[in-house]
Image: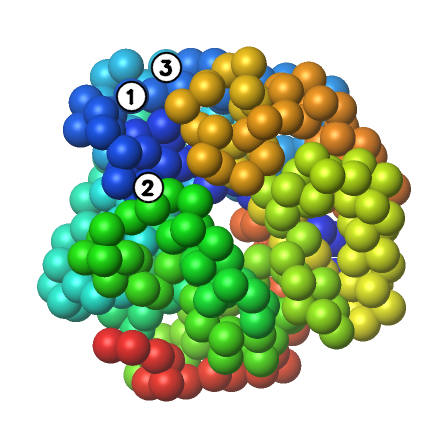
């Protein structure tokens, strides 16, 4: 297992970024999937890679996105459930509403891609007991939502500052990016215990020791200031993962592949003053770097590799989570 690394993308669409930042126009569900999906597939094909795409149900139900989404499964990639409405405040909803939300997303993603998800990632990092119970009842085998970092509150404060959200919208997003205590969570896979059920958890990897993020949005945030520093940081992170036996779970977001030349309305998002060419050049380097140290696979393949040793994984009770 030490030679594997998982790669995934949270396929958040244009409307979800606009709504999360309380920007006008999101209600018409603007989309960039017709541009983004072929661009991502081309990059992955250049490296001979397959990965997991966490799809938002609202996008899967709209006809204008169906062609782009069907390309994903046709190209041999895994699809996962990223909720239906992509609301970072889902953890404040009732268990019944959460179950309905995730079940609806499962149905429309399966219909749009021809592939039934078996994994879930919550919007906004972190997961509730209600979400875990819902995906367990749907037969899912894993969750990939947690982000073990101490920087959640700082990231949230920075996000509120640049988006200038009103107080009531900040309150709705109070769980966005997690809490300080998340930094003490495990970097390695473990099991959630839910009564008689268990769900595998694959955390989004942060740097061992410092617990600072290494997902590509953070790397590009650094690269916008110093490409050399971002490269050194990523090399160090991968080296520490190997040193401490952490199997990397590497995460992309759509704006990691879209630049200022593509979508000017996302200037508020970190790294969006970089051009798409510069971003793609950095990602090309980063994927080559990671591929030189690990075999990069979709999350489902990593989960399959754990099956023979699943009984030896640490167990965490879901009763410790928000209901």
The residue depicted at 37 percent of the width and 85 percent of the height is 320
Dot 3: what SS? helix
Mark 3 or mark 1: whose residue is earlier in sequence: 1
Image vertical order of residue 301 relative to residue 269, above or below: below
Snapshot quadrant of residue 69: top left
Q: Position of residue 275 (x, y in %)?
A: 63, 20
Snapshot quadrant of residue 242: bottom right
Q: CA distance from mark 3 to mark 1?
A: 15 Å
The answer, for residue 171, to whether it is visible in the render is yes
The residue depicted at 86 percent of the width and 68 percent of the height is 243
Specify the quadrant that holds the C terminus.
bottom left
Q: Which residue is mark 2?
A: 21
Q: Indicate which label's residue lies in the foreground, 2 or 3.
A: 2
Q: Indicate which label's residue lies in the foreground, 2 or 1.
A: 2
Q: Nearer the viewer, residue 99 or 285?
A: 285
The residue depicted at 79 percent of the width and 57 percent of the height is 237
Q: CA distance from mark 2 to mark 1?
A: 14 Å
Dot 1: what SS? loop
Q: Position of residue 31 (x, y in %)?
A: 34, 21
Q: Which residue is mark 3?
A: 67
Mark 2 or mark 3: whose residue is earlier in sequence: 2
């Amino acid at each position: 297992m030490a030679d594997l690394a998982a790669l995934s993308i949270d396929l958040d669409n244009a409307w979800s970024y606009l709504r999360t930042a309380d920007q006008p126009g999101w209600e018409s569900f603007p989309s960039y999937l017709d541009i983004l999906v072929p661009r991502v597939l081309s990059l992955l094909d250049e490296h001979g890679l397959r990965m997991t795409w966490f799809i938002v149900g609202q996008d899967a139900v709209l006809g204008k996105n169906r062609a782009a989404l069907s390309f994903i499964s046709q190209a041999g990639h895994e699809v996962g459930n990223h909720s239906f409405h992509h609301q970072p405040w889902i953890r404040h909803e009732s268990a019944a509403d959460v179950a309905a939300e995730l079940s609806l997303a499962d149905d429309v993603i399966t219909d749009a891609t021809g592939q039934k998800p078996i994994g879930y990632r919550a919007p906004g990092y972190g997961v509730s007991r209600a979400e875990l119970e819902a995906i367990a009842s749907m037969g899912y085998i894993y969750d990939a939502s947690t982000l073990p970092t101490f920087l959640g509150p700082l990231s949230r404060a920075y996000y509120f500052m640049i988006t200038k959200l009103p107080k009531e919208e900040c309150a709705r997003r109070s769980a966005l990016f997690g809490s300080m205590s998340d930094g003490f969570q495990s970097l390695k896979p473990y099991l959630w215990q839910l009564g008689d059920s268990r769900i595998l958890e694959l955390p989004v990897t942060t740097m061992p020791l410092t617990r600072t993020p290494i997902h590509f949005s953070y790397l590009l945030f650094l690269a916008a200031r110093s490409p050399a520093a971002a490269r050194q940081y990523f090399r160090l992170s991968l080296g520490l993962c190997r040193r401490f036996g952490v199997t990397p779970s590497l995460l992309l977001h759509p704006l990691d592949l879209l630049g200022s030349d593509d979508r000017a309305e996302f200037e508020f998002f970190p790294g969006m003053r970089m051009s798409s060419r510069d971003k793609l050049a950095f990602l090309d380097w980063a994927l080559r770097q990671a591929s030189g140290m690990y075999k990069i696979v979709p999350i489902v393949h990593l989960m399959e590799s754990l099956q023979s040793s699943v009984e030896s994984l640490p167990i965490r009770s879901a009763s410790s989570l928000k209901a």
